[in-house]
Amino acid sequence: MEVDWGQASQIAGAGFGTVFVVLAILAGVIALIALAVRRTSRGKDKNIKKGD
């Protein structure tokens, strides 16, 4: 039983590529959510009383 290294490297490359694309998309989504939270929470700290 021989290993077709060309096909094995193609499958491995596709897997690594998919992982990096998914991680990049997640990083972008998290950055957008952080930006939205920062904009919506701007100015709300002034209304919070200390000690509450």
Image (cartoon, rainbow, N blue to C red):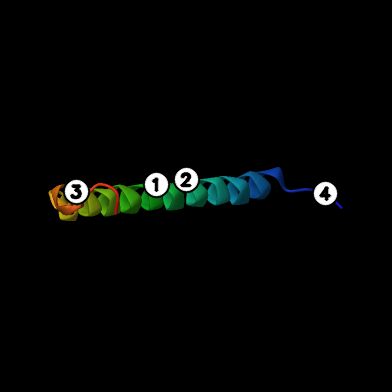
Q: Secondary structure at mark 4?
A: loop
Residue depth check, mark 4 versus mark 1: number of the one nearer the observer = 1
| Crowd band around label 2 with a 10 angstrom C-alpha radius: few (<14), some (14–19), many (20+) | few
Query: Which amino acid, by three-letter code, is at mark 4?
Result: Glu
Are circles 2 and 1 on residues that touch, CB within 8 Å?
Answer: yes
Q: How many numbered marks are there?
A: 4
- Residue 2 has which mark? 4
Q: CA distance from mark 3 to mark 2?
A: 37 Å
- The earlier-in-sequence mark between 2 and 4 is 4
Q: Residue at x 34, y 51 (%)?
A: 30
Q: Secondary structure at mark 3?
A: helix
List the residue tagged with mark 1. 24
Q: CA distance from mark 1 to mark 3?
A: 32 Å
- The earlier-in-sequence mark between 3 and 2 is 2
Residue depth check, mark 3 versus mark 4: number of the one nearer the observer = 3
- The earlier-in-sequence mark between 1 and 3 is 1
